[in-house]
Image: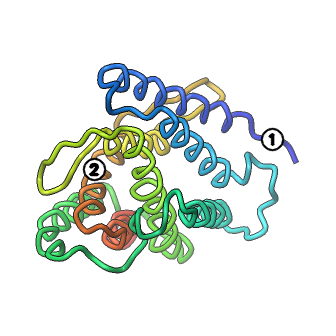
């Protein structure tokens, strides 16, 4: 099967952007940079992208359908396998049903803000006909795959790369929050096609900024349950209303 070089070129561009920003941050705050973890985080992005694209077309699509079921399942499996390594640990990256004490009450306004944002988007731009596969996919795999990776594995790895912390809104922030959200936004609004590199800033903003709310929820609750549920709500609501 032919390899999809456009995907590889797009990945290279994404990694270059993340590395460049990471290097700038590291130069500005060398005391709190662990370069090996930054490189490791970029490797995680590459592994995730390879799985999502079925290794850039080298693996046949055995599941079929209009949606990327196989790529998402491969990426989820890779995330869970890597997270199970002693270097990470499922509980450490938020793969637990247990919520931090008192966090659900504190999270209520953020939940309302996140859900309200996507409900408004759905009311303004939704209403397109959706198949059962569309709804089933959006209610499950986007959140189940992307949250454990971006708000779990990648957030943790970048948090180890940039060890400086700032206490704000009840959680300890680091550069990992912004970089993981940027990576998430680039995954949706940056790539390479027939006309060269394509960048959609509005898409990056609409996906990257709400991702900061998901980061806060993951940090505050010490669990990915709410980010997964809200992610799938945000994806599916425009197909339902």
Q: Which mark is residue 212?
A: 2
Left/right placement of residue 48 relative to residue 41 reads right
Q: Which mark is residue 193?
A: none
Quadrant housing residue 221? bottom left
Quick one: label 1, few (<14), some, or many (20+) residues within 10 Å? few
Task: In the displayed orientation, state which residue is furthest to the right.
Answer: 1
Between discs 2 and 1, the one toward the N terminus: 1
Which one is nearer the viewer's eye here, 113 or 227?
Answer: 227
Residue 236 visible in image = no
**Are dots 2 and 1 in contact, CB under 8 Å?**
no
Which one is nearer the viewer's eye here, 26 or 189?
Answer: 26
- Residue at 73% across / 45% down in the picture? 56
> Where does the image place residue 198, in percent across and percent down from the top left?
52, 29
Q: Which residue is mark 1?
A: 3
- Residue at 61% across / 30% down in the picture? 12
> Where does the image place residue 106, in percent across and percent down from the top left?
12, 69
Secondary structure at badge 2 equals helix
Secondary structure at badge 1 equals loop
Q: Nearer the viewer, mark 2 or mark 1?
A: 2
């Amino acid at each position: 099967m032919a390899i999809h070089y456009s995907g590889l070129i797009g990945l290279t561009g994404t990694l270059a952007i993340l590395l460049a920003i990471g290097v700038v941050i590291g130069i500005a705050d060398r005391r709190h940079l662990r370069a090996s973890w930054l490189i490791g985080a970029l490797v995680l992005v590459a592994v995730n992208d390879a799985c999502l694209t079925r290794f850039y077309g080298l693996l046949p699509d055995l599941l079929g359908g209009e949606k990327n079921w196989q790529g998402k399942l491969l990426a989820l499996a890779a995330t869970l396998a890597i997270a199970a390594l002693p270097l990470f640990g499922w509980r450490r990256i938020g793969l637990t049903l247990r919520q931090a004490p008192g966090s659900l009450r504190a999270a209520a306004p953020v939940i309302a803000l996140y859900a309200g944002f996507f409900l408004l988007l759905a009311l303004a731009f939704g209403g397109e006909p959706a198949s059962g596969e569309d709804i089933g996919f959006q209610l499950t795999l986007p959140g189940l795959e992307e949250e454990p990776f971006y708000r779990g594995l990648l957030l943790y790895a970048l948090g180890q790369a940039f060890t400086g912390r700032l206490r704000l809104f009840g959680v300890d922030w680091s550069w990992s929050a912004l970089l993981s959200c940027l990576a998430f936004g680039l995954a949706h609004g940056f790539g390479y096609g027939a006309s060269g590199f394509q960048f959609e800033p509005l898409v990056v903003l609409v996906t990257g900024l709400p991702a900061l709310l998901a980061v806060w929820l993951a940090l505050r609750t010490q669990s990915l349950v709410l980010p997964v549920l809200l992610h799938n709500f945000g994806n599916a609501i425009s197909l339902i209303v």
